[in-house]
Image (tube, rainbow, N blue to C red):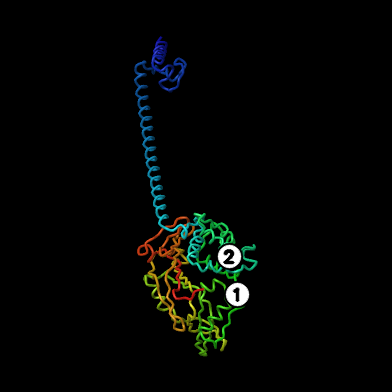
Amino acid sequence: METAVVLVECMIGVYISYELLCLVCREIKFCCSCVCCCRNGKTKGGEEVGEELEVKEEKVKEEDEEGEHRKRRNRKRRGRGKKIQQEKEQLNKILETKRQKEVNSKTCKGIRSPDFDSFLTSALQCLISIPEFFRSQENEEMKDTWDFKFNLQMSVSNEIKDFKRRYFDDNYKEIDIMNIRRCFTKVFPRFRHHDSFDLLMVLFEDIQKEINPTMAPFIPNDSLNYKDICQEYEKSHPSIVDQLFVGLSKLIYACQDCGNDNIIYDEFKYIQLDCTHQSSTSVFEEFLANINRGQYCHYRCKKCQCDSLCMLARKIIKYPKYLLIVIQKEECKSQTQSDKPIDYKDSFSLSTLDSQTVTYTLESIICKSQALIYNHYSAICKRESEWVLFDNTSCYTVSETLDLYQRPDSYILFYKAEDHPEL
């Protein structure tokens, strides 16, 4: 009878509160068939069962409400974050549009290309600032040359001419350089770490081959004066690259054994400043002051046929019309770039061997910022008496006093000779 009473009470309690819910195993089933519920008479009345279940249900509801509140709060935060990000993007677009409106769209255009091709876009923007470079190519006839380096019949000069045409065409707001990029695919593969200076050297070399290539090596007569030597050099090097970017220097190797002076004439293309271990910002002035200072080196004398220590003196006979100054800040071992600014000047003067003075003024700058995968390059060029920063498709004016000199990311400086004879 006791068992029967217990079963009846259990069944009544369960039926009244939550249908067939067992209080021990928490499963919905008939109480009379549940061993856990009726073992040792462990049963509770319907009211106690209902109270416990209501408390548990309230806790579950509170947890659900708290969870929903947390989700709504997170959604609001994400929404505010997206809204702030959208406002920033809109503000940047407005600022960029305002900056782009400040520059002349006919002479200042962005170049559309991936970020890893910024080494190419920055170099092209600097070349656009040299009108003689493109003007001479329009008047020259292209020579059919087979370029073994690319294993394809390609003409870099033709692509450069087409780039210049599209750059000054009002129908193009941005310039695509995919065709030019294909010309350098073998030498500069995509998705790799490349350098603007290496690109300029390869570009100049290819143009020298295609337009008025040098037919014979330059061997001057020592009996001629310096002016006649320069004229002979210009006749043997008719390429536009030689006329704009190449000068002529006289190397004198003074043998310490026999006292003979070995004279060699060499091309003068650029100046490289090593600033990896330089703590002073006046490295530019120090180099200009000591540009003609001699240095010791090993050389095989032509007279005594001995490898001896010679004093090398470099004398500049002819400076190029456009002088490139490369600022080397990256150490070879650590591959880290120094962030020390170089105090370069807007203009400076140099003297040739025949006591002629050449004054150079700054025209363009290629800036280089170090990154983890590849370096990023941008260009600052003088366009219509204003300095314009070109960063791929973006272009806007910059302050000459604040954003131009003593830049820690300056890499290649383009200087133009003011009193250089026109082509």
What's the residue at 51%, 72% (across, down)? 244
The N terminus is located in which quarter? top left
The residue under label 1 is which amino acid type?
A: Thr
Determine whether label 2 and label 1 are within 8 Å by CB: no
> How far apart are labels 2 and 1 at the CA level?
16 Å
What's the residue at 44%, 83% (across, down)? 355
For disc 1, the neighbor class at 10 Å (few under 14, some 14 to 19, many from 20) is some
What's the residue at 65%, 66% (across, down)? 146
Q: Nearer the viewer, residue 397 or 32?
A: 397
> Circle 1 — which element?
loop
The residue under label 2 is which amino acid type?
A: Ser
- In the rendered image, residue 177, in percent from the top left (x then y), is placed at 54, 58
- In the rendered image, residue 299, in percent from the top left (x then y), is placed at 53, 82
- In the rendered image, residue 328, in percent from the top left (x then y), is placed at 45, 68
Q: Nearer the viewer, residue 316 or 242?
A: 242
Counting the numbered discs, the total is: 2
Farthest residue, direction top:
1
> Circle 2 — which element?
helix
Vertical placement of residue 356 versus 32, above or below? below
- Residue 157 bears which disc, if any? 2
Circle 1 residue:
214
Q: Nearer the viewer, residue 403 or 139?
A: 139
Vertical placement of residue 86 versus 186, above or below? above
